[in-house]
Image: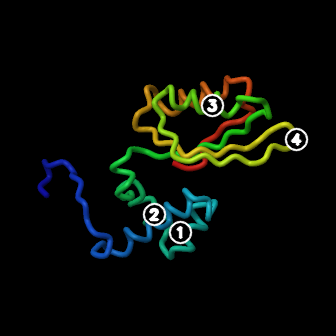
């Protein structure tokens, strides 16, 4: 590639990639799934340096992410009220979010934790605006992104 050309994207089978790329992808997966809580712990587990992770982390992502847009996991703590979950899901869909997964814990202490896997490529506004809107709803106690 000459100096004037812009970077491009390629679809490459993972078995031909240098090992560092595979380890960076695995490190990202560990962090996104919550199997490891810190970059330090995840890089230690995959056997790469933190500097290598930071160097390549934005340059590699799974193929399904490229096809379907960005997928985020949002955790929402809802008040135990009839229709609370339905209202939140309607808001997400109404703003163009594609709900991929829903996991709700049994309510306790007047609240229930809900984890939503959301594809954000169709959002009519940014993710921050969506989170801000969720936080203003009376049934939402807390709302945060767990993984992106």
Q: Are marks 2 and 1 in contact (CB under 8 Å)?
A: yes
Residue in the picture at 38% in, 59% down: 62
Cα–Cα span, label 3 and label 2: 35 Å
The residue mark sitting in front, 3 or 1, is: 3
* Image location of residue 64, percent across then percent down: 37, 54
**From the image, which quarter does the N terminus lie in?**
bottom left
| Disc nearer the start of the sequence (2/1) | 1
| Disc nearer the start of the sequence (3/1) | 1
Q: Are marks 4 and 1 in contact (CB under 8 Å)?
A: no
Nearer to the camera, 100 or 134: 100
Find disc 1 in the rendering and name its residue.
43
The residue mark sitting in front, 3 or 2, is: 3
Find disc 4 in the rendering and name its residue.
109
Query: Image height check: is 26 above or below 87?
Result: below
Query: Image height check: is 102 above or below 41?
Result: above
Find disc 2 in the rendering and name its residue.
53
| Disc nearer the start of the sequence (3/2) | 2
Residue in the picture at 47% in, 30% down: 126
Residue in the picture at 14% in, 49% down: 5
Cα–Cα span, label 4 and label 3: 20 Å
* Image location of residue 45, percent across then percent down: 56, 74
How many other residues sit within 10 Å of disc 4, few (<14), some (14-19) or many (≥20)? few
Find disc 3 in the rendering and name its residue.
88
Nearer to the camera, 9 or 83: 83
């Amino acid at each position: 590639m000459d100096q004037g050309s812009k970077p491009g994207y390629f679809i490459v089978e993972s078995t031909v990639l240098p090992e560092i790329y595979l380890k960076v992808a695995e490190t990202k997966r560990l962090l996104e799934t919550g199997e490891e809580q810190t970059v330090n712990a995840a890089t230690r587990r995959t056997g790469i340096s933190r500097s290598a992770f930071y160097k390549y982390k934005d340059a590699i992502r799974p193929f399904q992410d490229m096809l379907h847009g960005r997928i985020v996991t949002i955790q929402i703590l809802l008040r135990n009220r009839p229709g609370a979950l339905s209202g939140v899901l309607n808001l997400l869909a109404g703003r163009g979010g594609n709900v991929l997964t829903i996991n709700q814990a049994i309510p306790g202490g007047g609240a229930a934790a809900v984890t939503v896997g959301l594809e954000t490529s169709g959002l009519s506004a940014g993710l921050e605006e969506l989170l801000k809107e969720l936080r203003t709803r009376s049934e939402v106690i807390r709302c945060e992104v767990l993984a992106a």
